Image (cartoon, helix red, strand yellow):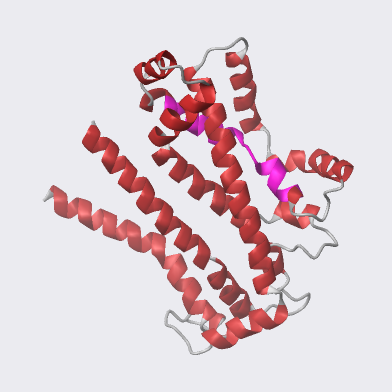
Amino acid sequence: MNRVLTSAALAIGALITLFPYYQLAVMASNTTADIYSSPPTFWFGGHLFENIGEVFAKIDFFGSVVNTLVVAVVTTLLVLFFDSLAAFTFAKYDFPGSNVLFGLLLATFVVPTQLAAIPQFDLMAAFGWVGDLKALIIPAAANAFGIFWMRQYARGAIPDELLEAARADGAGFFRTYWSIGLPVLRPALAFLGIFTFINAWNDYLWPLVVLIDSNHVTLQVALSQLNGLYLKNYAVVMAGTLVAIVPLVIVFLIGARHFIRNIAAGALKG
């Protein structure tokens, strides 16, 4: 009976979670007039490809996808490297001021990211990076959440005995991190990679600010251009949004499988 109730609860939760995406697909396949109809339509229409074609006609969709893909992939790789390296150090090595430094790192959680936009823009302007994709990648190359998440995982997942054995064999810090730390941290890296990629892909405010008067437009900024000043074709906007989330779904499926596989492997070893 408990298994039936659990399965029913999971099924209901899945339906509630998936319904907005279903409705997004429905709205993308209808017209704006159908969206405003009363009662609202909950079934697919026949205008999906027409709306997608209008998206491609109005904005440089594929160019913005390439820009966003470059930013998301490079940012994710940098975050995975720098955050895991810093987390491994905080978790398994004691050095003067480590607790104070980690406390300052955690303090950045309480600071809204919007407050850093102006000084960060001034810094990018000083480097001459305004309007360049480097202004999106470099500031996001490491973040406090990733370091905190990886540190908490590393503290319990990496046995001290392995590190002592590596030191006894003459392995240096980076060799220990690369050969012992990273293989153990794979499940945490998979989660952090998914999280970072999705955030970079969906980022709107900072690209809108720093890529002003630039040809390097990211996808979310490009999609915002589908909204007219006086007339908004919501069906076209929904079609653009639908196409934009396809890469996210692919990345999530790949990353989630890797995450679950490594968690299962760790459980079997335990």
Horizontal side, residue 159 vs residue 209: left or right: left
Range covered by the magenta-colored residues: 135-154
With respect to residue 134, does 88 lie above or below? Answer: above
138 or 57: nearer the eye?
A: 138
198 or 87: nearer the eye?
A: 87
* Residue placed furthest toward the top: 96
Residue 56, given in percent of the width and then of the height, sits at: 65, 80
Q: Does the magenta stretch include residue 10?
A: no
Quarter of the figure with residue 57: bottom right
Quarter of the figure with residue 122: top right
Horizontal side, residue 180 vs residue 57: left or right: left
With respect to residue 158, does 119 lie above or below? Answer: below
251 or 198: nearer the eye?
A: 251
Q: Is residue 145 visible?
A: no
179 or 66: nearer the eye?
A: 179
Question: Which residue sits at x=65%, y=30%?
Answer: 108
With respect to residue 247, does 121 lie above or below? Answer: above
Of the 4 image quadrants, the one containing the C terminus is top left
Question: Which residue sits at x=31%, y=47%?
Answer: 261
Residue 102, given in percent of the width and then of the height, sits at: 59, 21
* Residue placed furthest toward the left: 1
Quarter of the figure with residue 153: top left
Q: Is residue 144 magenta?
A: yes
Q: Is residue 90 visible?
A: yes
Question: Which residue sits at x=63%, y=37%?
Answer: 142
Residue 146, given in percent of the width and then of the height, sits at: 54, 36
Residue 11, given in percent of the width and then of the height, sits at: 27, 59
- Count of numbered labels shown in the rendering: 0
Dominant secondary-structure state across the stretch colored magenta = helix
With respect to residue 254, does 143 lie above or below? Answer: above
